[in-house]
Image (cartoon, rainbow, N blue to C red):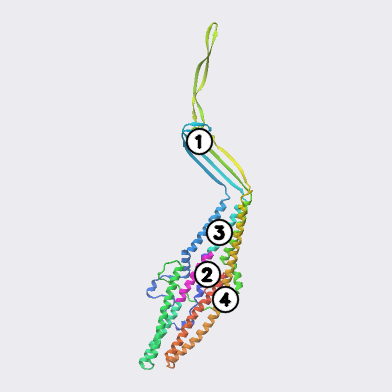
Amino acid sequence: MCMQRKLFLGVGIVGCLLSISLTGLQAQSAPGAVSPGASTGKADTLPVLSLPQCIDIALKNNITVRQGQLQVQSSTLQLKQSKYNQLPSVNGFASQGFSSGRNINPSTNQFVDVGVRSNNFQLSGSVPIFQGYQLKNLIRQNQTIVKATEKELDATENTVILNVIQQYLAVLTGAEQLTVAKRQAETSQLQVERTQKLVNAGSAPEANLFEIKATLANDQLAVVNAQNTVDLAKLALLQAMNLPGGQAFEIEYIKLPDPRIEGYSATALQVYEAALSTQPQIQAADLRTESARIGIDVAKAGLYPRLSVSGNLSSLYSSVGLSRFIADGTTTENKTQANVLIAGTIQPVTIITTQPGGSYQTYGFFEQLSNTLNRGVSLNLNIPIFTNRQYRTNVTSAIIQQQNAQLTADNTRLQLRQQIETAYTNLLAASNRYQATDASVSSLERAFKAAESRFNAGAINAVDYSLAKLRFDNARAQLVQAKYDYVFRTKILDFYQNKPLSFN
């Protein structure tokens, strides 16, 4: 689910929930009344947050969402690594050493009694050919895990969005209740002023004035309580966005027509069937089950033979390594081998030998590396015969994990079905409550207007007038709550079906 859709979801839900302005209240609004969310005076400098802004801030600051994003990155990294595992592996090794005393010449394997400096270089590599389809199945499993973590992140973001919507709704509800309370207080204030004039003129008893003032005091207390409710709701909204409390701000107020009360277009079962294919928590649970099923194939790979090709290159150098003779001219040597008697005279027998001149020099560094270079290639076959039943145990464990993942998916479906059934039942109750409350407001409004006319004419006392006003005010407040509850239940069922939400 993209960010644009999430913001549209949030705005759509709350937009429909903002249908809270009663026609009767609009007709009775005082000229100086201020709508919820509007501000005057010093409040004009306060920042105004819209619902999309609140959702965006909450998603950026929420720790659980950030952990989910890291989990997606981690699973994506694991997927890349499982693909890299199909590539050859190459390793290099180099060493340099020095030893004195009696040593073995690494070039001739003969003992020498000198200091020896030596180097050893190796390069090896291997390529997997057949691993019991383990690498292929690991890639499939990690691909499934990446999709599962993405869906789990979507589910987490949905939870955060719905929480922000709920807190945003609480601020709007409190603001509307505050407006209702202020209008009630304004009406009582006007009635106090009128009654004061009548008492001063002697047209009404002073007891009426005391009763109306008591009603005004009660209305002013309701204003204070409503303001406290708004402040607490704003604090909860800040906390939902992971922002520190105590920040002054206003929210964007949207006014929409009253909702239409009509039967919902789908049954609870139809809503559930639609939710199965759209809700990310269901999709994530199914993907986790599929991942666990592929994990069984991964575990079975340990039962198959494994075939690979490996090769290596190695070479070495020694300061007392092989040497070569460097010629430098020739030398002549006369050597008497024996004496012989010739004609009675002893004559020496001399042998003249000629030898090349020169000296022995050790081969250079790179020459030794070239002369001692060793190459090798091998085909390796590993056949598991008896491994203490380790691989069999791994397969059994993978089967248990798959069964547990399936039960988790079944439980997720069960919870979703129960949530939808509860939401559907609450919708029916909210619809009945809203219709009954709306009818009650209409009746009590007419009764209050009649009582107000009779009170102004002196036909009834202040107590009867106050009771009529109290009943009418309570009914209007209950209608606000009933309307919020009804629209919220409707949009929740729409949300389960992934329906586009709008302000209309």
Secondary structure type for disc 3: helix
Residue 304's disc is: none
Q: Quadrant of residue 421?
A: bottom right
Q: At x 47% / y 85%, what residue is drawn?
A: 471
Q: At x 56% / y 51%, what residue is drawn?
A: 84
Name the residue nearer the viewer: 431 or 329.
431
> Which one is in front in this view, the residue at disc 3 or the one at disc 2?
3
Q: Is residue 492 magenta?
A: no
> Which one is in front in this view, the residue at disc 3 or the one at disc 4?
4
**Above or below, 324 relative to 202:** above
Residue type marked 4 = Thr
* Residue assigned mark 2: 9
Secondary structure type for disc 4: helix
Q: Which residues are magenta?
A: 154-174
Residue type marked 2 = Leu
* Residue assigned mark 4: 425
- Residue 396 drawn at (x, y percent): 62, 57
* Residue assigned mark 1: 317
**Above or below, 504 relative to 364:** below
- Residue 404 drawn at (x, y percent): 59, 62
**Above or below, 138 relative to 52:** above
- Residue 414 drawn at (x, y percent): 59, 69
Q: At x 59% / y 54%, what residue is drawn?
A: 138
* Residue assigned mark 3: 146
Instruction: For marks 3 and 2, give the CA distance.
Output: 25 Å
Instruction: For marks 1 and 2, give the CA distance.
Output: 72 Å
